[in-house]
Image: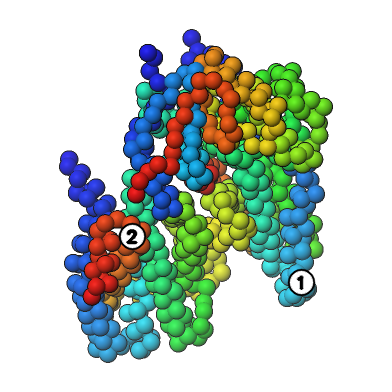
Amino acid sequence: MNWTWFYKLGSPKWFYETANKLLPWFLWIGVLMLVIGTVWGLVFAPEDYQQGNSFRIIYLHVPSAILAQSCYMMMAVAAIISLVWKMKLADMFIASAAPIGAAFTFLALFTGAVWGKPTWGTWWVWDARLTAMLVLLFLYFGVIALKSALENIDLASRASAILVLVGVVNIPIIKYSVEWWNTLHQPATFTLTEKPAMPPEMWMPLLVMVLGMYCFFTAVALMRMKNEILLRERRTKWVKTIISEDIKR
Amino acid sequence: MSRRNHSEQGLLSVLGVVLKREFLSAYRSRQELANPLVFFIIVIVLFPLGVSPEPVFLSKAAAGLVWVAALLATMLSLDRLFQSDYDDGSLEQLVLCAQPLYLIVLIKSLIHWSLTGLPLIMLSPFLATMLHLEAQHLPVLMLTLLMGTPVISLIGGIGAALTVSLRSGGILISLLVLPLTIPVLIFGTGTVQSSIDGLSVAGHFSIMGMMLALALTLSPFAIAAALKISVSD
Amino acid sequence: MSTALLKADKLTCERDDRLLFSGLSFELFSGEVLQLEGPNGAGKTTLLRILGGLFSTFEGVVNWKGQDVRQCYSEFQQELLFIGHKSSVKATLTPLENLRFLIGLQQSVKEGALWQALECVGLAGYEHVLCRNLSAGQKRRVALARLYLSDAKIWVLDEIFTAIDKKGVAQLEALLVEKAQSGVAIVLTTHHELAMPGVRQLRLGQVSE
């Protein structure tokens, strides 16, 4: 099998040029979908018979939770690629995506808390999913902290890849134990609205929001990666050309 | 015919050499060994002082407090695992040794545990009694600590290995490692809670055993990989 | 001519935005002494660490007995003696205990040999003194005592003459010559003027940008 496409993927220059072409698409489609999804969800979707209008926060909470988790999974895949194939781009992805993932996790926690107030009467509740999200936030912080503490780029990339992988192995264990802990301490459990039980008028805007967030994530990740590439490859000819052209303009 | 014509040093001899040096070095700085233990005691004492000395509150919180204090005390002691070896250059020699690094690392971690975790476990029944935990639950508490503290030491070893080239010490290690130790904490305290509620604890212990088995088999590899990276500079 | 023990093939290394060396190739034969020369920061220590297998961010290949070192690293490790910048000596242990540990990682030696080695480096009488009470030069000599005991076939030595007096330097040079004659391949860096015969030099720090 011809693996050149894979190795081409590892070329920062190729990635930078491709990112430039794809970025506007992801950005505008993402923003569009987010706007449509938000308006649809907040204004047009029908009221939930149990929770009234407060359930609408789901249109922010669920997509950000989904993104928070899949971002970490993507980082884990990138960590494997970075360690096994020593691809610089994979490490740049981890550096770029970690803060975005942390932001999504925080958004999920915040919207979860905001949802909690009208629904459960309190700003914070030690619900299994929220608690697991909180631990995920700590895992993100750990990666960000380690990366910024180690100055040597090569050291930082390999060390943070190992940390991401150690974290990903722990995530199912953490989730299982937090859920188990939650059942011990909260006999009166409540479930978040299950998606299949929602009528299409409710879950379609949710789907739009999820897809919109993925596009937005990709756009922001591409932007950050472009910067990372320019920074790390700043002594190569092609970057110097870009910078000098920028200065001329 | 032997491939090499000099006196081979087998795996067990190398591990023996490492073991001797670890214990010798710990003995020579034995006053430092007390520090995590004193910290353990102080943290536990802070709670009745800071929250409430009511037996009702304390006995409910006892298992959790002892566990959290053990977790924090172990975190602080992890610095000792690799830092001085890195500083004087002997860590490099361990990485260069022809024997598998992950086994050397496993030995170092277990010795470290025997010098910090094990004394914590011995102290725990006294402290738990001060927190009004009933005597019949003390063995359960100690057994959960016995199975859980090695896991904390091993996962902590990963954090220590990743950060040994920095001088950030315990704080960064704790930030990286504490979230990963949450499952052990949950199951450790949950087991004691089950015992207090009069429920069976066999299932909980088997889960703790599983975590211990996983930590023993997987973390040495992660620690070895992290050490090789930290030493390469 | 026998195959080279160690062969560096087109090594290129970049650190901290500086190109240290590019396309560097050289061979090291059994019984040879190779000195890496160059100004500070030229990459001598980095090259030594690459040869020792500690540093792996470089392009090119290092071959050990014809095979890529990365494929046969543990066989290579068994024949390697690497002495780096730091003394590897624990302040809370005695020279005897430190030496026992350091050499014990690689080969088994009799107690008597340990005492003899310490005597050879001029530490007779200090065997049971805690290393924290020794001078920097004395601590260095504890690590160097390994040289008298090791039967590794390839020695990678980074600045071993630091903090050693003239007599010590002459003694070490004599040891290196003796070992080279018995077939050990030696790569070293040093700021000292070496008085040993037959030292080949490799100059670093001449990469043009």
> Residue at label 1?
B48
Residue closest to the eye, C9 or A142: C9
How many numbered circles are shown?
A: 2
Quadrant into which the N terminus of chain A falls: top left
**Label 2, label 1: how far apart the Cα atoms are:** 57 Å
Residue at the top extreme of this rendering: B1
Q: Which chain carries label 1?
A: B
Instruction: Find residue B173 and report its image quarter.
Output: bottom right
The picture places residue A244, in percent across and down from the top left corner, at 26, 67
Residue closest to the eye, B133 or B183: B183
Give the mark toward the camera: 2 or 1: 2
Q: Is mark 2 on a helix, strand or loop?
A: loop
Instruction: Find residue B170 and report its image quarter.
Output: bottom right
B56 left or right of B226? right
Residue closest to the eye, B49 or C199: C199
Residue A35's place in the image compared with A106, above or below, is below
> Residue at label 2?
A234
| Residue found at x 25% / y 65% | A242
Residue B68's place in the image compared with A189, above or below, is above
The picture places residue B163, in percent across and down from the top left corner, at 55, 53
Q: Which chain carries label 2?
A: A
Count neighbours of disc 2 (C-alpha within 10 A) and say few if under 14, some if 14 to 19, many if 20 or more.
some
| Residue found at x 20% / y 62% | A18
Q: Is mark 1 on a helix, strand or loop?
A: helix
Count neighbours of disc 1 (C-alpha within 10 A) and say few if under 14, some if 14 to 19, many if 20 or more.
some
The picture places residue B202, in percent across and down from the top left corner, at 59, 50
The picture places residue A35, in percent across and down from the top left corner, at 25, 83
Residue A64's place in the image compared with A168, above or below, is below
Q: Which amino acid does label 2 sit on?
A: Arg
Q: Can residue B161 be seen in this view?
A: yes
| Residue found at x 74% / y 60% | B39
| Residue found at x 79% / y 29% | C127
